[in-house]
Image (cartoon, grey):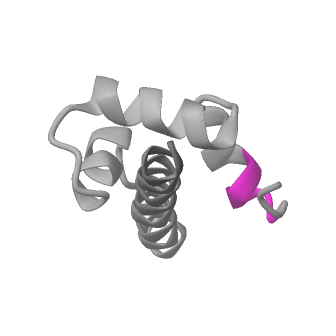
Amino acid sequence: MQPTQNRQTDSQNKTELRAQSAWRADSASPGLRLTDISLLAGYADQIYFTKMVKRVTGELPRDYRARLLRGEEPE
């Protein structure tokens, strides 16, 4: 049972790192569309990216992005 839990944790960490790198790029260029951010994060499908961001952050990408652009720290 332990290896499955570790793989899930690794997968979650990878997803979070991919999303963080995309949001850093967005901070540098706030005019990027969500589609562009999802591509920067390595997701060809924006719908899947939206699901992953919601799973990791607990909020929709537009809400998470707005909070970051206001200067609020991610939780």
Q: Residue 51: x, y in percent?
A: 44, 26
Q: Residue 34: x, y in percent?
A: 38, 41
Q: Residue 12: x, y in percent?
A: 49, 51
For the stretch drawn in magenta, the main secondary structure is: helix
20 is higher (above) or lower (below) than 28: above
Q: Is residue 26 left or right of residue 67?
A: left
Q: Residue furthest left?
A: 44
Q: Is residue 46 left or right of residue 54?
A: left
What residue is shown at x 61% (from left), y 48% (from top)? 65
Q: Residue furthest front?
A: 1
What residue is shown at x 70% (from left), y 57% (from top)? 68
64 is higher (above) or lower (below) than 11: above
Q: Nearer the viewer, residue 19 or 26?
A: 19
| Residue interval drawn in magenta | 67-71
Is residue 69 one of those drawn in magenta? yes
Q: Residue 56: x, y in percent?
A: 59, 42
Q: Nearer the viewer, residue 30 or 18?
A: 18
What residue is shown at x 44% (from left), y 53% (from top)? 3
Is residue 68 one of those drawn in magenta? yes
The image quadrant where one finds the C terminus is bottom right
